[in-house]
Image (spheres, rainbow, N blue to C red):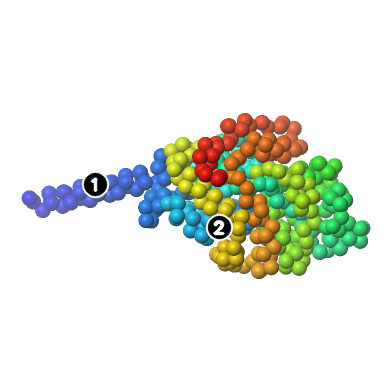
Amino acid sequence: MSAPMVRSTKLVASALAVLLTVLVSGCASSSPEGGESAASGDGGLTTISYIDAGSACLCSYPRLQAEAQGYFAQQGIEIDNKTSIFNANQLIQAVAQGQADIALTGGTAPLASAAAGKLVKVVAVLGAPAPEQITLNNQTLEKLAQKGVTPESPYQEKLAALKGLKIASAATGSTTDLLFRQILTLGGLKPDSDVTIQPFSDAAAGTAAVKQGASDGLAGFPSQTTGPEADGWGKVFIDIVKDAPEAANIPYIVVAVNPDFLKNQPDAVTKFLKAMTQARDDAKDFSQEHSDALHQKFFASTSDAAWKTGIEAILPVFTGSIVPTQELADNLIKVYNIGKPDPVSVPFEELYDTELVKALPDA
């Protein structure tokens, strides 16, 4: 064989090898729409493209606990955490567009997405009721105390005392924002005029605004709301679960899945849900070892006192059944429609898919 022909043959062989590599790697990765097959990671684990609020919020407890304890690997999956976003609507948008397979997000975000015609499927409710709290800084607490209103006052008096205050909150339309608006409305206040609601896309920025006095308080969830008291500059003023439990009975954190991924990869979704039930079971009997591991891995910058108060406040929310119910779904729609000129209505079976979670023992 001549030298030119040898070189030509080698070039063709090399080109075919490259093409084969591309084709194989392409088949192993998930498609933009959720894919027919999840990617295969190290050790043969199934890789799930994932997104949530990260360690900005203890609302991500189920995923963080599962990761800290190695439950995902036990179930044969690994999480490719694309990024962390403190905005439920953006999380859902990523799932709806196929940029992520699964997200943990606030309960209202999938409903808003469905109302906009961008469907995702909610396959589990990891936390309920929603443990929203209103925390005020010390300066504001002192002013209200001079008027005879303290955190120990009757709920209606505390609610009325919010009039005229500046309250930091999560993004407009988030679960935090909508639930806060609901309790104001039910209490006879006008959310758009009686209280100045200051939306923040970053939890740390909202907390800093309250600490520095640019805001009087914040609406949020533990540990964002419990940390100020532990660190000496604020205190929980209203605890909705204790003060207005009927308003808090909505899905707090849900598992939202890209519809194509759910259809094509039900086994991967089931494995994810099994890891979530393991984290749920830990919340029922949370050991000191569990606490230390989670604190050190994801919340190392949080003081011991703030960590203790935050984790103790949030864990009860994550101890119940993870099966979505019609009652929770109906309550969520009521909250979502507060103040909306054009109320939305999404059938339960259109937004929720309970087949996989109901098949799990003790879900």
- The amino acid at mark 2 is Gln
Quadrant showing the C terminus: top right
**Residue 104 location in percent, x, y?**
57, 48
Residue 207 picture quarter: bottom right
**Residue 315 location in percent, x, y?**
64, 55
Q: Residues within 10 Å of mark 1 (few under 14, many from 20)?
A: few
- The answer to the question of whether label 1 and label 2 lie on touching residues, with beta carbons closer than 8 A, is no
The vertical placement of 73 against 191, above or below, is below
Position of 34 compared to 161: left or right? Answer: left
Position of 137 compared to 116: left or right? Answer: right
| Residue ID for mark 1 | 16
- The amino acid at mark 1 is Leu
Element assignment for label 1: helix
Q: Residue furthest right?
A: 147
Q: Which mark is residue 65?
A: 2
Q: Residues within 10 Å of mark 2 (few under 14, many from 20)?
A: many
Tell me if I can see residue 167 in this picture.
no
Q: Earlier in the sequence, mark 1 or mark 2?
A: 1
Residue closest to the eye, 255 or 212: 255
Tell me which residue sits at (55%, 36%) in the image. 353
Tell me which residue sits at (28%, 49%) in the image. 18
Q: Nearer the viewer, mark 1 or mark 2?
A: 2
Disc 1 from disc 2: Cα separation: 45 Å
